Image (cartoon, rainbow, N blue to C red):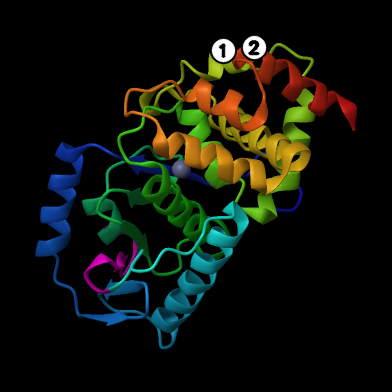
Amino acid sequence: MRGNLLKIVFLTILFFSSARATSNAQADNFPWEGKRKSEHFIVYYQSAPLGYIDEILNWAEKYYNDINNEFGFIRIEDFWTWDKRTKIFLFKDKNSFRAVVNHPEWSAGEVKVITREIYTYVNMGDFFEAILPHELGHIVFREFVGYKKKLPLWLDEGVVCFLEKNNRAERLMVVKKIVSTRSFMPISELNDIKRNSIFMPEIFYAESSSIMQFLMTVYGKEKFLVFCRMLKAMENAGNWELALKSAYGIENIQDLNDKWVKFLKSN
Ligand SMILES: [Zn+2]
């Protein structure tokens, strides 16, 4: 990441059943050479260098523990076991991966949250450092708060970008540099950005990440856990701002924006 402030990994997340069904069918029909399991994961692979699959399983188990710890989530028995293992589909190369996974060029990996599927290929850049924790973060977060909760995209992405520890400082620096410029998007603008309308991904992901850094730095992970529990408890169509107010005492989006901007300008 050295020398490139905006070199950030982007990912695609799919919640929607139609896309899921298509890719599921394709993945199931793929000529997998074999599969290997660990406690919470199963890797389907084509051909891979010696030790590569074990490396994936080892990193995945490590991140599983790290993420639950980082979020303050209590380990729930049978959270991910046996038939509920997360599947990691490992293609032999980028072309094989691209033939099945369709998403924007700027997006690297892919995760399907509801069916707990992660798609990757051998030697995908940044996979172990950033993509794996990011994608696994999507699965863990949504497993906890609920798949159907209507949340702004920046919140889903901010939560998991926070897990990319190596990118935190750079992203925060990017946002601090632009906070007083016209490139900066207040939360009212971030709220309008959907998956298919991210036209400035570097700024969108950096800002989303920095909002989580603000919340974690100022309020700590105990409040974040309260926030997640509030999200989990609310109705599917519920207002996430109520969870924000209950957990953090932050009145509304404008109040969150004001406090976040103050944080960005403060140190
Ligand atoms: Zn993502």
- Residue at disc 2, secondary structure: helix
Above or below for 66 versus 200: below
Q: Which mark is residue 188?
A: 1
Residue at the image point whose x is 68% and y is 15% from the top: 255
Residue at the image point whose x is 29% and y is 82% from the top: 36
**Is 92 in the magenta?**
yes
The residue stretch that appears in magenta: 82-95
Question: In the image, which is nearer the foreground, mark 1 or mark 2?
Answer: 2
Question: Residues at badges 1 and 2 in contact (C-beta under 8 Å)?
Answer: yes
Q: What percent of the width, then of the height, locates residue 183?
A: 67, 16
Residue closest to the far bottom: 50
Q: Is residue 103 visible?
A: yes
**Is 97 in the magenta?**
no
Residue at the image point whose x is 37% and y is 37% from the top: 104
- Which is nearer the eye, 74 or 47? 74
Q: Which residue is mark 2?
A: 254
Above or below for 143 versus 202: below
**Which image quadrant for residue 18?**
top left
Residue closest to the far right: 267
- Which is nearer the eye, 245 or 202? 245
